[in-house]
C-alpha cells in the first residue's frame, strides 16, 4: 500500500468522494441534512482545520470532522473505508483532530455512538474515550 496522507478537507472538491465514503459505512455514520454541500460549507466557515481526510494515491479513504464551540469539542463522522480498516488510519485521524482541538484550548471532547455499534464503542474505549453514565442525549429540530 502506498503511503497514507492526512490533510484538511478541500471544499468543494472533496465533497463527493467524502459523501460517498460516509454512505458506504454500514453502521455508525448517519448521513443527514447537516451533510449537504451547503451545510458543510457553513461548518468549514467555523473551523476548516478540524475537517480531515486521509487519502491514498489521491483517493479519499477516511475522514473525521471535529467541532469546537470555544468550550467543548465534538467529533463527527469518523469513517474509514472497509478495505483500509485495521491499519491505524482512523487512529491517525483521531490523533490529529484531538491535537488540533487541544491547540485551540479544548479541554474536553465528546462523540456520539449509536447503541448498536459495539465495534465503535470498543474502538473508542481502546483509545481512551469513556462512556458517560447517567447522561441522556436530547435533540430538537430547529429548521
Image (tube, rainbow, N blue to C red):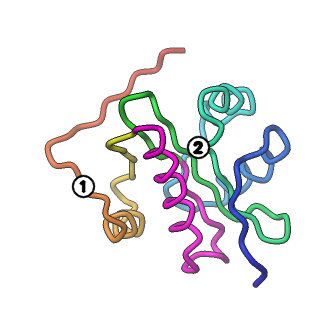
Q: Position of residue 102 (x, y in %)?
A: 43, 46
Look at the image and tell me in which quarter the C terminus lies: top right
Q: Which residue is mark 2?
A: 50
Q: Which residue is mark 1?
A: 131
Q: Position of residue 87 (x, y in %)?
A: 58, 80
> Mark 1: few, some, or many residues within 10 Å (few <14, many ≥20)?
some
Inter-mark Cα distance, 2 to 1 = 23 Å
> Mark 2: few, some, or many residues within 10 Å (few <14, many ≥20)?
many
Q: Decide which of 46, 28 is in the foreground and name it.
A: 46
Residue 50, quarter of picture: top right
Which element type, helix, strand or loop, lies under badge 2? helix
Q: Position of residue 51 (x, y in %)?
A: 63, 45
Name the residue rendered at 40%, 61% in the picture. Answer: 117
- Asked if residue 50 is positioned above or below residue 129 in the image, the reply reads above
Which element type, helix, strand or loop, lies under badge 1? loop
Q: Look at the image and give the residue range highlighted in magenta.
A: 77-105
- Image mark for residue 86: none
Indicate yes or no whether the magenta region holds residue 79: yes
Q: Image check: 8 left or right of 69? A: right
- Asked if residue 83 is positioned above or below residue 43 in the image, the reply reads below
Residue 134, quarter of picture: top left
Q: Decide which of 8, 43 is in the foreground and name it.
A: 8
Q: Nearer the viewer, mark 2 or mark 1?
A: 2
Name the residue rendered at 47%, 46% in the picture. Answer: 75
Magenta span: helix, strand or loop, mainly?
A: helix
Name the residue rendered at 31%, 66% in the picture. Answer: 125
Indicate yes or no whether the magenta region holds residue 20: no
Q: Earlier in the sequence, mark 2 or mark 1?
A: 2
Residue 128, quarter of picture: bottom left
Q: Image check: 101 left or right of 48? A: left
Amino acid at each position: 500500500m502506498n503511503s497514507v496522507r492526512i490533510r484538511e478537507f478541500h471544499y468543494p472538491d472533496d465533497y463527493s468522494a467524502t459523501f460517498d465514503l460516509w454512505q458506504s459505512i454500514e453502521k455508525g455514520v448517519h448521513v443527514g441534512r447537516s451533510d449537504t454541500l451547503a451545510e458543510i460549507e457553513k461548518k468549514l466557515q467555523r473551523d476548516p482545520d478540524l475537517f480531515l481526510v486521509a487519502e491514498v494515491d489521491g483517493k479519499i479513504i477516511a475522514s473525521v470532522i471535529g467541532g469546537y464551540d470555544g468550550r467543548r469539542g465534538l467529533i463527527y463522522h469518523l469513517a474509514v473505508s472497509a478495505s483500509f480498516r485495521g491499519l491505524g488510519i482512523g487512529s491517525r485521524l483521531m490523533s490529529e483532530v484531538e491535537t488540533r482541538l487541544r491547540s485551540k484550548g479544548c479541554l474536553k471532547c465528546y462523540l456520539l455512538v449509536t447503541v448498536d455499534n459495539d465495534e465503535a464503542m470498543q474502538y473508542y474505549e481502546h483509545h481512551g474515550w469513556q462512556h458517560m453514565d447517567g447522561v441522556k442525549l436530547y435533540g430538537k429540530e430547529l429548521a
